Amino acid sequence: MVSPKTYRAGTLKEALAQVRRDLGGGAVILGTREVRRRRLFGFGSREVVEVTASDGSAPPERPGKLASATSVIIPTASTEALHSQFGERLSQLHSMVADLSKQGRLDHLLPDLPGELVSTYASLLEAEVPEALARRLVRFVAERLEPNELIRPDLVREALCDAVESSIPIAPPIAAVAGTRRVVALVGPTGVGKTTTVAKLAANFKLAHGLRPGLVTVDTYRIAAVEQLRTYAEIIDLPLAVANEPDEMQRAIDELGDVDLVLIDTAGRSPRDEVKIRELSDFLAAAEPDEVHLVLSAVAGERSLRAAVERFAVARADRLILTKLDEADGLGGVLAVLGHADRPVSYLTTGQAVPDDIEPANRARIARLILGHDVVS
Ligand SMILES: Nc1nc2c(ncn2[C@@H]2O[C@H](COP(=O)(O)OP(=O)(O)OP(=O)(O)O)[C@@H](O)[C@H]2O)c(=O)[nH]1
Ligand SMILES: [Mg+2]
């Protein structure tokens, strides 16, 4: 075993990330503490978190008192592994945390948090949940459960799942019915999967629901974009119309003929490009859509997700579609954004395959994915 190493960072999460980068998923945490570090040239000092860890290849040596407590294995990125390690190690963690708490070593890191929930807190940070939100979630668990229930991993898990679920608003699937024309537009940043999702939705409404969808594209800036949608239209056997200008929009929709569902694919826009987003809004205003879904990639970080939600507000997006769940490592950033986006989630997409890799949003499923209790398959 490599002898224990020390990692310092501004936050516990950053320190744990360093440990994982350096020692891998099997790393054993031997201790955490807050230290004051003198700045260069003596200008004041700042608080940093120090984590002592070993590579976990053999039982840890005894670095003072902490080694008498049991070790903590940092969960790996794999959700299955996270799940099994989390469950197995939880009871061992409690005794370690109880020890640490007795020594007062965690109090300053996590004030007013019961020691039994420190491992839950750490697992949320591992899932990329921002610290403030992770604290709120574990506090919810602490308030929900009696003190003697906190040592029950099943109850903690259930309460945490409830806490996460309560911050995920869900929209019903697209309300298309035979005989009426429902107009639905997809907007969003570049490359998030709008065109692929339009094709998945169209194919499913046609094949599974027996409806007659039609496609409209306003992405006329790139020939390849029109061709991409045309290819799907041909394979699924759907009518396709192109609108080059906002005032061509109604003509394009009418050109589709007698359809139950009009799916409008739009050009990807950088959330920073206000002019192009406004241009897009003009197309949408002309289409008078019944629903506008903002498509967001689960791979994106919290900041860019937030920016997309804010900037696409002018396009009057009223629902969210989360794509690329199969590619995302941690969904904590998504959770943080959902809590503030004020828009419910309508669909999840879980791969490139048309039409299979799409599912209507389900609160429990999203919560389990975020917490690593469920895997995308
Ligand atoms: N892994 C994965 N890839 C996806 C998913 N959805 C779409 N993609 C892929 O993402 C890439 C971009 O998809 P598009 O549908 O062209 O994205 P877009 O938003 O229309 O892109 P622009 O029109 O250029 O803005 C393609 O390679 C898709 O196969 C998904 O759920 N998971
Ligand atoms: Mg596209």
Image: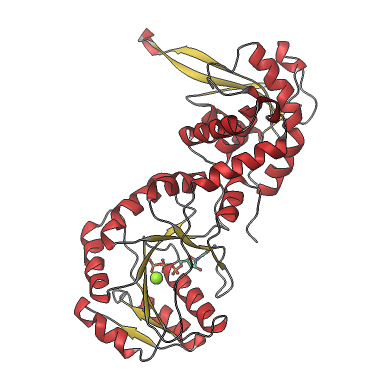
Determine the image quadrant of residue 51: top right
Q: Is residue 216 above or below residue 115?
A: below
**Residue at the far top in the pictured view:** 42
Quadrant for the N terminus in the image: top right
Determine the image quadrant of residue 138: top right
Q: Nearer the viewer, residue 225 or 79?
A: 79
Q: Nearer the viewer, residue 109 or 65?
A: 109
Q: Is residue 161 above or below residue 5?
A: below
Please give the name of the residue rendered at 40% of the width and 50% of the height, measured from the top-left corner: 305
Q: Is residue 136 above or below residue 286?
A: above
Expressed as whole percent of the image width and height from the top left, the position of residue 24 reads: 66, 37
Please give the name of the residue rendered at 71% of the width and 36% of the height, measured from the top-left corner: 153
**Residue at the far right in the pictured view:** 58
Q: How is the image coloured?
A: secondary structure
Asked if residue 164 lies left or right of residue 249, the reply is right
Expressed as whole percent of the image width and height from the top left, the position of residue 65 reads: 72, 11
Residue 331 appears in the rendering: no
Q: Is residue 311 above or below residue 6?
A: below
